[in-house]
Image (tube, rainbow, N blue to C red):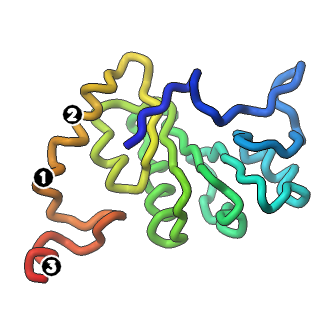
Amino acid sequence: MKFINATTCPWKHAIGEDGPKPDPDPAPHRLLSLEQWHAVRAHWPQDVKVAIEFPNDADIHQLVPDLHRIAMVVLDFPKWTDGRAYSQAHLLRTRHKFTGAIRARGEVLVDMMQLLARTGFDEVVLRGDQSQAAAQKALDLFAPVGFYQGDVAETRPWFLRSAA
C-alpha cells in the first residue's frame, strides 16, 4: 500500500480563479472530478492519462468505456462507516480488470487498511489524525499467514490454495 501525502502528490486539480475549471485543458497528472471528466472526455487526447475523483454514490460502471485512458481512480470515504467505495474498488479490479491505481481518501482510518488492500486499493490518503506507522503495522499483521477467504489478489479460498 502506498501512503500519499496530499501536499506532495503529483496529481493536481484543474483550478481557475473562481474554483474548479468546468472544462480543463489536457495536461499530464491532471486530477479531475467526474463532472469535469464528462465535460472533456470527448476531446481529451487518448495518450494523456488522467485521474478521476469518483463519488461513492455514483455507478462505477459509467467509467468502464474510459478505463484504458484513466491512470487512477480516487474513491471517497465521506464517513468511515460508509463502505460503498470498497464495492466500487472491488468491481473495478475483478469485473472490469482495471490495472491503474485506486486511491482511498476522506475518512480513511488505520482500522480500514486490511479491507482496503483486499478490495483493490493500492494508495491511501489517511485522515490527518491517523499514523502511517500504525497503518503499515495493520497491513503487515496477516501478511505471513494470509486470509481464509479469497480477495482481489487471490480469488481462491485458503483451502483450495493449500490443496494445489
Tally of marks:
3
Of labels 2 and 1, earlier in sequence is 2
Q: Amino acid at mark 3?
A: Leu
Asked whether 105 or 122 is in front, the reply is: 122
Q: CA distance from mark 3 to mark 2?
A: 28 Å
Identify the residue under disc 3. 160
Asked whether 63 or 12 is in front, the reply is: 12
Picture coordinates of residue 159 (x, y %)? Answer: 10, 75
Residue at position x 48%, y 56% in the image: 89
Picture coordinates of residue 128 (x, y %)? Answer: 43, 18
Q: Secondary structure at mark 2?
A: helix
Does 82 appear above or below 99? above
Identify the residue under disc 2. 137
Q: Amino acid at mark 2?
A: Lys
Contact between marks 3 and 1 (CB within 8 A): the answer is no
Looking at the rendered image, the quarter that the N terminus falls into is top left
Q: Is residue 127 left or right of residue 153?
A: right
Contact between marks 2 and 1 (CB within 8 A): the answer is no
- Which marked residue is nearer to the observer: mark 3 or mark 2? 2
Residue at position x 87%, y 25% in the image: 16
Identify the residue under disc 1. 144
Q: Is residue 62 visible?
A: no
Does 104 appear above or below 145? above
Locate residue 140: give its quadrant.
top left
Picture coordinates of residue 86 (x, y %)? Answer: 43, 51
Q: Amino acid at mark 1?
A: Pro
Q: CA distance from mark 3 to mark 1?
A: 17 Å
